[in-house]
Image (cartoon, rainbow, N blue to C red):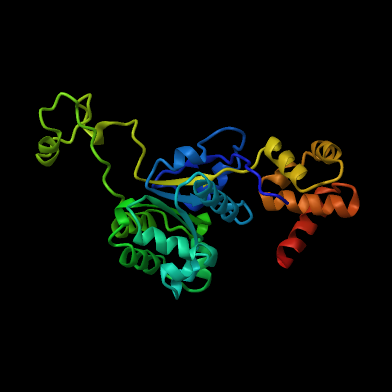
Amino acid sequence: MSEMDLNRRFRIVGDDEQADDIEQFAGLFGRDYGEGWDSLLRSKRVVVLAEAGAGKTTELRAQANRINKGGGEAFFVPIERLNSLSLADAIDAVDSERFASWLRGEPRPATLFLDAVDELKLVRGNFSTALHRIRRELADVLDRVQLVVSSRPGDWLGKADLEEVRATLPPARRTPLIAENHSDPFLEAIRGRDQRADGVPPEEDQSQPSDVIVAALLPLDRKRAIRLLGNLNVANPDEAATQLDDADAWDLTRTPLGVIHVAEYWSSHASIGTRAQQLEFSTQQSVLD
């Protein structure tokens, strides 16, 4: 299967929402509702929540690749490695030299994609410890680091983890936009005249993105599931889609892993099968995975 951009969508999650609320809401949408990656990456600290098999790791890797191919700097880090390794050693080996060069070179912004808090907890790791390790190692360059963290909803502790991010890796304050009619922009800045050109203080400007956001990765809709089926080289994907329509079984394809299981069953049986057969097959494959 080749890498493809499904233009995944997200819903911004409120601080008070619980894991059950996030998962229930995510099941209601999926089309072109919500935000895209470009919108999310306007913020300095981003938390992505999604259930198992939803494609968190694939999405984070794809965004890191996209930034790098566009001439920026991005690094993918399996966060469970930070339980026992330094950040430099935790980064994928193919990127380690580039990471060292970024640290030594001219000041340039970079994005760290930390995947995934649930895997960290499986190895009895501590999220706070991982964040403090990053803070120590990037203390001199933290103001130019963007952070994207992924987790399953059930492993994200809501306000507690959010405050840990804010306290340990506080986002750098945005550079104020100084009005052109100031007599001396430098003097105005150091006097604390923190206003935009239109006179509105940044904290009152609701159009600015939040510096720390939590976003739920929404499920695949029919259009995206069909695109993924085609990318999996499924024979006669139109017929597979017709059978999914007849069985009213598109909910089986709400995650990329679900689409893969449907494709594997179709390839083996030349049929979508009954819902019971699909669920049994998906359960068996998940155990094997």
Vertical side of 245 occupied by 138: above or below = below
Q: Residue at x 54, y 52 (%)?
A: 60
Task: Measuring from the top left, give residue 10's x and y in whole percent.
Answer: 52, 41
Quadrant of the image containing the C terminus: bottom right
Q: In this view of the protein, can residue 183 be seen by the observer?
A: yes
Q: Quadrant of residue 94?
A: bottom right
Vertical side of 192 occupied by 137: above or below = below
Task: Measuring from the top left, give residue 247's x and y in whole percent.
Answer: 82, 40
Q: Residue at x 37, y 50 (%)?
A: 109
Q: In this view of the protein, can residue 147 be seen by the observer?
A: no
Q: How many marks?
A: 0
Task: Measuring from the top left, give residue 97's x and y in whole percent.
Answer: 47, 65
Front residue of this view, candidates 7 and 164: 7
Q: Residue at x 70, y 37 (%)?
A: 222
Q: Quadrant of residue 243?
A: top right
Front residue of this view, candidates 120 and 249: 120
- Outermost residue on the right side: it is 270
Vertical side of 161 occupied by 240: above or below = above
- Outermost residue on the bottom side: it is 84
Q: Report whether 76 appears left or right of 29.
A: left
Q: Residue at x 28, y 60 (%)?
A: 140
Vertical side of 162 occupied by 207: above or below = above
Q: Report whether 252 appears left or right of 139.
A: right
Task: Measuring from the top left, give residue 50's x and y in whole percent.
Answer: 55, 51
Q: Report whether 104 appears left or right of 29.
A: left
